Amino acid sequence: MPATREVPRFDPVRVRGGHRPGRLLRHRRRAVAAGLAVTATALVAAGPRDADGARGHPPRPPAHTAATSGARPSHPSGAGPVTAPIRISDAATVRLLRPGDRVDVIAAEETVSGGDARVVARGARVTKVPEPMEGAGDSGALVVLSVPRATAARLAGASATARLAVTLW
């Protein structure tokens, strides 16, 4: 074993600037803000996708089918439903509806040669049944449906030229 030696004397080491409380606090705020931004980004990236649905919930069945049987769905893959307020000509029928009900929407057009009816939306989900306004008279009643965007466009077009009716599932 080597002989022990005495440690030589030297001047203390001085660090320039040191740690001032204001500077440390300012950097801590920046670090916390950066940490929150990184956490938020990670949560958004790890969150549910449109195809996955919300975590912990069963996947939703397809809400709607095309207006004609055997056709492809009327909305592109990944497009979510939109809300479509429509006026149903028979207000008494609307009073039977409750949020969550599934309905088919039928457009009845009167032509010179007689009447023609067609299904505009199948399996539309009722999201809201607003209370009728006073003095609305015999103009029907409003109902809000959740449908794909393309079906909402068909509903808007049909309501301009025909009387709309619903059938319950």
Image: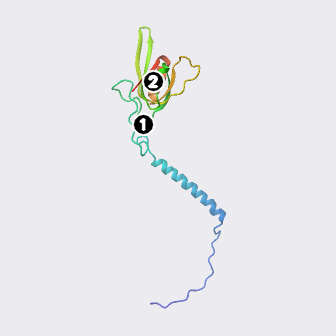
The quarter of the picture where the N terminus appears is bottom left
**Residue at the image point whose x is 50% and y is 50% from the top:** 41
**Residue at the image point whose x is 41% and y is 14% from the top:** 116
Residue in front for this viewpoint, 148 or 169:
169
Residue extending farthest to the left is: 70
Q: Please name the residue that numbered disc 1 is placed on.
A: 78
Rendered location of residue 9, percent (x, y):
60, 85
Give the mark, 2 or 1, whose residue is nearer the N terminus.
1
Please tell me the numbered disc located at residue 69: none
Rendered location of residue 10, percent (x, y):
61, 83
Rendered location of residue 157, percent (x, y):
48, 21
Q: Please name the residue that numbered disc 2 is placed on.
A: 154
As drawn, 118 above or below 3: above
Q: Secondary structure at mark 1?
A: loop
**Identity, as a three-letter code, of the amino acid under mark 1:** Gly
**Identity, as a three-letter code, of the amino acid under mark 2:** Arg
Residue extending farthest to the bottom is: 3
Looking at the image, do the residues carrying marks 2 and 1 touch, with CB atoms under 8 Å apart?
no
